[in-house]
Amino acid sequence: MISTSQRGQARRGSVSPGTRLARTLLLMALCVCAGAVVAAPKTDIVVLVNGDRITGEIKSLEYNQLKLSTEHMGTLYIEWDKIASLQTDQYLLLERTDGTRYYGQLVAAEKRDSTLRVKRNADQPLEAVEMAVIVRAQPIEGGAIIDRLDGYVSAGFDLAKANNRTSIDLAGGLSSRTRVRAWSLDGSVNLTDDSAGATSERYQLQGNYRQFVRARDFYLGFTGLERNTELDLNLRTMLGGGYGRYFVQNNHSEWNGGLGLAYSHENYTGGETFDSVEGVLTTSFRVFRYDFPETDIGGSFSLLPSLTKSGRYRAEGDLRAKYEFVDDLYFELKVYGSYDSQPPLADTEQSDYGITTSLGYSF
């Protein structure tokens, strides 16, 4: 892990019980990410355009690749345009480029015409969906919640001999999606220490919720906990909501944005506390390419102008690139930054930024 910081040293100080509790909750949330996911029976049938048939378990379709778990060949990634038809008893959520969603089982087609037959239940007729416009497919199971979870964990470590400087970066997350809603929980920890006793701590725990209302539109809710000693911030808690939309959604890219309101409570070094109401403008994107070099690039940016303190605004952003070198194992490079135009304390830094590299596992 490689980490840089704008300030050479971070202030030392006593850690409040509330901060210790926040750390404990964050680390517990990250540990949950290591839980195993129960697999469905491998009875789904994939027919390729060359006539080959593969039996396995459909895990997902994203960015033009179908992820299929097989009994003897491990996990396969099959390009979507190389598939002629699918058959499964699992209930899948299918999503088109225009945001239209279908839910049901996939019935074997009588002929190859590049369409999927979706059966919602025995009382309704089959729906035909063109494969070329499908951008996402995901099993929506009716069992325990652990069966519907996706997640990741990652870790990085850096050691500099000259000043005995060490940096540790840990991250993890869980997410789930159904026909009408999606949620995610992400946490990260960045710790830096050196022989002179200078330390830096950065903790984040963020939760997001989306309730789909129309083809590409959704209501959004979000909450977060943050600690950053570079900005003299002991703990910030935030809760808010708003409305969002997918502007671009296809097999190679995705871009969405939203706006809303948020309430935040901030506790700074020395015990000062501040409450504020903020506007929220947020956007995120993801681009995936399979040509060499295989690249998965994504990023997010949020602008939060204060409605209670004139002239103050905050900004948060990150940019990340991920390369999967073995099934479900990946290398990630991430750049992040934070900015506050008018920090509540006069001697507090306005910005903090860094670069991290890590190895991760997704499930």
Image (tube, rainbow, N blue to C red):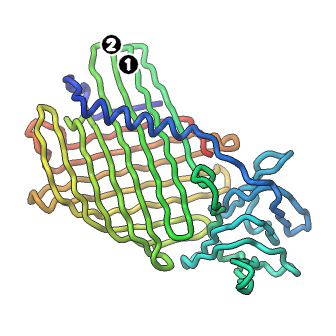
- Compared with residue 285, is residue 101 higher up or lower down, i.e. above or below? below
Residue for point 80% across, 74% down: 107
- Where is residue 257, by image quadrant? bottom left
Residue for point 35% across, 71% down: 243
Residue 134 pos. (x, y %): 65, 73
Answer whether labels 2 and 1 touch (C-beta < 8 Å): yes
Q: Which mark is residue 228?
A: none
Q: Residue furthest bottom?
A: 125
The residue labelled by disc 2 is 195
- Where is residue 108, by image quadrant? bottom right
Q: Earlier in the sequence, mark 2 or mark 1?
A: 1
CA–CA distance in space, label 2 to label 1 = 7 Å
Q: Nearer the viewer, residue 210 or 90?
A: 90
- Compared with residue 157, is residue 42 higher up or lower down, i.e. above or below? below
- Please, what is the three-letter code of the amino acid marked with disc 2? Ser
Q: Nearer the viewer, residue 336 or 85?
A: 85
Residue for point 78% across, 54% down: 41
Q: Nearer the viewer, residue 153 or 340?
A: 153
Is 11 placed left or right of 66 in the picture?
left
Is 227 placed left or right of 250 in the picture?
left
Question: For the residue carrying disc 2, how many other residues have a C-alpha within 10 Å: few (<14), some (14-19), or many (20+)?
Answer: few
Residue 260 pos. (x, y %): 29, 67
- Please, what is the three-letter code of the amino acid marked with disc 1? Arg
Is 111 placed left or right of 188 in the picture?
right
Q: Secondary structure at mark 1?
A: strand
Is 4 placed left or right of 135 in the picture?
left
Residue 103 pos. (x, y %): 64, 73
The residue labelled by disc 1 is 165
Residue for point 60% across, 64% down: 252
Q: Secondary structure at mark 2?
A: loop
